[in-house]
Amino acid sequence: MLKRRIGRPLPFLVVFAHLGLLGFVPELLSPVTAAGAEGSYEANARPFLARYCFSCHGEEKQKADLNLEAFGKNVSMYKQRDHWELVRDLIVEREMPPEEKLQPSEEERLQLVDFINNELAKFDCDDLQQPGRVTLRRLNRAEYNNTIRDLMGVDFEPAADFPLDEVGYGFDNIGDVLSLSPILMEKYLNAADQIVSKAILSEVPAWPPQQHFEAETFRTRSDDVRDEERVMGFFREGTATKLFRVDQDGTYLLKIRAYGQQAGSDPARLSVRINRQEAQTIDVPAFEDAPGIYTLPIQLIASSHRLELGYTNNYNQQNHPVSELNGDRNLFVDYVILEGPQDSPPPSLPESHTRIIPQQPELGQQIPTARRHLKRFVSRAYRRPATEQELNRLTELFAYALEQKAPFEQAMQVAVQAVLSSPSFLYRWELDPSADGPEDQAVRTLNPHEFASRLSYFLWSSMPDQTLFDLAADGSLLQTKVLEAQVKRMLQDPKADALVTNFAGQWLQFRNLDTITPDPDLFPTFDDDLRASMRKESELFFGAIMREDRSLLDFLDADFTYVDGRLAQHYGLEGEFSASFQRVSLDQRSARGGILTQASTLALTANPTRTSPVIRGKWVLEQILGTPPPPPPPNVEELSESQEAITSASLRERLEIHRANPECATCHEKMDPIGFAFENFDAIGAWRDLDGRFPIDPSGELPDGRRFKGPKDLIAILKTEDTFIRTVTEKMLTFALGRGLEYYDKCATDEIMAATIADNYRFSALVQAIVTSEPFQKVRLITDNL
Amino acid sequence: MTKSSFTLSRRTLLKGAGAALSLPWLEAMTATANPSDPHKRENPTRLGVLFMPNGVRETEWTPSGQGHEFEFSKTLEPLAPLRDQLFIPTNLWNQASNVGDGHYVKTSGFLTCQTISKSLGFDINSNGVSMDQLAAQRIAGQTPLPSLELAISPVSIGVDTNVGYTRVYGSHIAWSRPTRPLAREINPRLVFDRLFRSAYPQSSNSQHDTLLLDRVLGDARQLQRKVGAADRSRIDDYLESIRSLEKRVEQASQPAGKTWQPAVDMDPLTKPAGIPEEYAEHVRLMLDMIALAFQTNTTRVCTFMFGNAVANTNFSFLEGVSGGHHSLSHHENKEKNLVQYQRIAQWHVEQYAYLLTKLSEMKEGDSNVLDNSMILFGSGLRDGNKHSPRNLPIVVAGRAGGRIATGQHREYDRNTPLSNLYRGMLDAFGTPVEAFADSDGALPGFLA
């Protein structure tokens, strides 16, 4: 137990720990903290430890080998991070002190935790080069769908039936939780099968059209041998004929596969006659082990025709004085292909097909052609140039399918399916270069291809496009100006909608709107249409801030929003509205403006039957201020929802009674006032003046004494705090990296924040600062290899 | 080029032609079964588990009277016609789930009888292998699918911040390894597809099996050598998943090793359309899939979750019920809530009865599929208001080929380990274990 914990704080506690850890001294919300945060170990931590901990973890006894007294009186906690993180976590989780021992009060617990967090944050960024390391990430469902769409050009959401991706740190793209179960693997294989069937035609007629004349269909002299290889042999001079028909005038190509048993000084010679006219006489120098394909153009009219192949230079010498000239020359023809007319229109192939097979193989060129196509395809699918070894193995697989008499296209399908099932496709790799690099190096910069992937999966939840590939290939992507321009371009691209649904949808949680179940008796106006409109409003709103590059503060307080007729009615807006969304201006008197007053947020933070100021307050603390309260102490009595209770007093009064319990007060003092500010919005976000028969009082006071009259006032206070910017920064950095933030990320977070604030809080400034940050551009090398 | 005679099936692409696969897992498959193994008998034994979240109304669950002369409680009344097929134990408890939180440990620990490690999702550990998986692993290779995991709701995601556990724990009862919960299928159409594909593999000619999985396995192994510990565990997932698929197709494509044939034909026309909108209809379809899987002998081990832990399924389709399951389970001893809570549990029992009846109507030689099955029904806690894993509501139905002494209600000493029952079931399944979790012996009177 102890071992497991050391060095690996429980992630939510890490988030909780950010109360102080990332430099934010939460004066706004915790007066307790403010008092405890400053000062010495001697004054602030040791009394607690002496009273509650030393009896088991001190000089007398060292349970779990832990002696906290041994640290002495001047403790630099950040130097013994692992120990103090463990202590903090056990205290927060109420696992220590054990139940049967003397217990500290909630206030004492939180005070110590805040002190530890502050102490742990006292390290010097200049000494620390630590970009962290992201655990190998599997493509999640959204990324898989988008990557297939962009790679293959087929868009049918193949991942719809995949199991849901697990969520860590609030997002579903976190390497540490994205596991792969056998059933998911089965679905990957099936999806790959479906994808190649949809993207690649399994058999494409030859173009230009072809007629095949197999050797055995020629009319020949009876003594010309056809051996079991179905090859026509000319063992002396003579001809073979074939009658055929074409339906269009035009230029045709005759392709003759032939070889000689060579002897004498000349190669075997083949004469070709069309309709008894000499077309060409061809030298056939090829041998049996590598027959040649001999091509000649002919003009044909739509009619029946006669093809005549002739052997013209038979040779048989056994007694020649020059021994090299001894031998028997014979000519063999395997088959003839008539291809044309050459100007016939190409078959219309879907774009997804030509993307992978841009051109049909020349005769006998299947394998090299496939390899060429695969090289291009794999270099996109794996999001970096394909290696020779990978191509060899895939080409082998292709050749095997060909051997099994698969047509070219089906053999390509097999190889492409293998690519789509490969770990190199399904995971995003950032492999360290092999051990021949400098040994003392602890950190490396991502290579341009890895970086391009990070960028595109961050902003698009998909693979890099051709532009990014090109800039990665020539290495220029990492140049400041180039990168800046690309980020701008990417945010304007429709694919950046993925940042709205995946980042904003999880940060602001409107993805979860599907799960809310307002009581239909109490909220008869709620239905799936309204649910969809709520989500759409928030998506459009986030999209506008992103694409118009507005200030991040607009998230909290904006003078516009988007409504359709349904939502306008829900909000009680006057005017004409249609079924489609339109942007509306909100004036000063409007109750709405910003995410906190959007129906999606308000409905998400309510119970099915009533509003919940506690949930709303908690939501603001978590998602906006980044200071989630700890879980409630065990065995707390829940607020009674009985009929008697509900009619006895207003919710506010009832919660105040609940809060009288000092164990509860510490956290509820922070959550409840924030939640109550929004009480004029009911459980589905509609305006109301009364809660049942009780009038609503949206005013309140924060723990630090600042008062507000209502939601607008409160929002104005929230806006003045950098806490919100820090929270957005942390959330977006987490999403961008696909890992939880660690203590050392404080350095990068501070820099990103400063850059964002310096650039007027612009959305793109935040994104630019993230993609140029150390943790985004670099990676810690692994030391635990092998 | 001549016209294609290409029969290679891309979907079943498997072992390389010629590429000798001296893969370790193949050895496991060639192990000869014990001659007294019930799975070599004409009618194999099946093991099913139906998990109900949120507990029951205590006072309406336990039958009165003991032994063969018992009377059904109101909640169990729907099982009355199946009386002779039932074994109802009272007073079993799951000690290992008596710690931690109210729901998660009681779900993930339901079949492992071990305590989950507190986790936010990064280091989940159930600290045990579930009873069904112990059984499945022991008979691996005898059916196309080793086991089938089914559910109604998608995995609940994220962390329940009220208790500090990842909701993953509330969505799984089947654990193939302590760190590996088995993903469940929730779409009955896809369950049917899987059963059908497994029962009728497309490739009948092993020469046409291909190198694909080999290829990707090779890719994975190469990458595996180059990564650090955290990444390696990710790629191990991948390797293990590929291997389990490879094992299945390998088996299907080996004429000599093919001891299996669907016991009954599957009719593609009975394929469900998808996930129905109504919860009750969805449950029925999933139960039909279990029956089909068992009848065709496509698998012999199946677990099903009516809902995830803390499921607040709306049961207002039942008369007199207006509210979510979890909310009502916190009944505060109010009669109004208790009535509805009881009705919901009874509905679950009705569904159980539906499955049992269906299995009993499937003839199998002189007996029927239910005779050759054991289907456990239960919840990880008794009373939703108390969250106690004592005196758990548990029923076993089916005789397991005559090995279970059905037709009785037995009341055991207080705090008899639930794991004793599981040990008995593993015995009856023909896969006895030396020890299991906190089991301290046999459950008296369970085995015939």
Image (tube, helix red, strand yellow):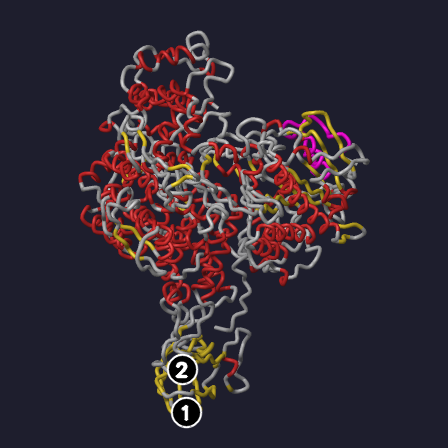
Q: Which one is nearer the viewer's eye here, A176 or A617?
A: A617
Neighbours of disc 1 within 10 Å: few (<14), some (14-19), many (20+): few
Residue A320 in the magenta stretch? The answer is: no
x%, y% of residue A211? 45, 80
Q: What are the residue bounds of the magenta stretch?
A: B420-446
x%, y% of residue A567? 36, 53
* Mark 2–mark 1 distance (CA, rounded to whole Å): 16 Å
**Circle 1 sits in a helix, a strand or a loop, which is it?**
loop
Q: Amino acid at mark 2?
A: Leu
Left or right of B284, for residue A500: left
Q: Which mark is residue A270?
A: 2
Work out which quarter of the rendered image holds the C terminus of chain A and state it: top left
Q: Which one is nearer the viewer's eye here, A21 or A71?
A: A21
Seen in the picture, residue B154 relative to B56 is either above or below; the reply is below
Q: Amino acid at mark 1?
A: Asn
Q: Nearer the viewer, mark 2 or mark 1?
A: 1
Chain letter of the residue carrying label 2: A
Q: Residue at x 40, y 80 (%)?
A: A339
x%, y% of residue A310? 43, 85
Q: Which mark is residue A275?
A: 1
Seen in the picture, residue A390 relative to A86 is either above or below; the reply is below
Q: Which one is nearer the viewer's eye here, A209 or B178?
A: B178
- Per the picture, the main secondary structure of the magenta-coloured stretch is loop
